[in-house]
Image (cartoon, rainbow, N blue to C red):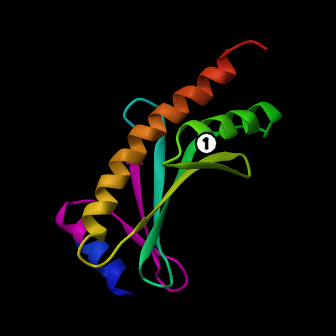
Amino acid sequence: MNALINALGLTFSNQGIKYAVAGQNEEAIIIMQKMKKAPVTLKIVYIVAEDMQSMSIKFYNLYHVERVTERLILKVNELNKIYRWVKLTIEDTDVVMSMDHMVDETNIGRLAVQLALIGVQMGDLMYQQIDEMYEKKE
């Protein structure tokens, strides 16, 4: 396990956050977090880059659809233009949110917690906007 994953795991342990180390080279940590407003539990995956200088955070389970439609693609593109700090993608039939940040051993824990909180807030907002799109009649 690399030093950044160790530092991140230590931060989560100290805060009582349950986590699992993942990845073929143990380069990722997974936590689960309920959203505040949306009826969803996010699977948050922190992936440390090979260069050990950055981390990607992916928020899975944000929004699930039975099938991907043009309407959903247009909505995701619209939200990506509005909210440039996070990026939405569609993976299979799920909308996934991601963000990246530069890190080192001294700041990875603090940043991971802060970005998870921001991600949950953004996730609630994104969920609401996508859900409203489906509630509107065409």
Tell me the quarter of the picture where residue 11 sits.
bottom left
Residue 99 x, y percent position in the rendering? 49, 57
Q: For mark 1, give the secondary structure.
A: helix
The quarter in which the C terminus is drawn is top right
Tell me the quarter of the picture where residue 106 sits.
bottom left
Which residue corresponds to mark 1? 80
Q: What residue type is labelled 1?
A: Asn
The quarter in which the N terminus is drawn is bottom left
Up-down relation of residue 134 to residue 81 (above or below): above
- In the picture, measured across the screen, residue 115 lies left or right of residue 87, that is left
Question: In the image shown, does 4 or 87 lie closer to the viewer?
Answer: 87
Tell me the quarter of the picture where residue 71 sits.
top right
- In the picture, measured across the screen, residue 128 lies left or right of residue 135, that is left
Residue 100 x, y percent position in the rendering? 47, 62
Q: Name, please, the residue furthest toward the right.
A: 70
What is the tally of numbered marks visible in this picture?
Answer: 1
Which region of the structure is painted magenta? 11-33
Which residue corresponds to the image point at 29% horizontal and 57% vertical from the top-left?
Answer: 113
Q: Name, please, the residue furthest toward the left.
A: 14
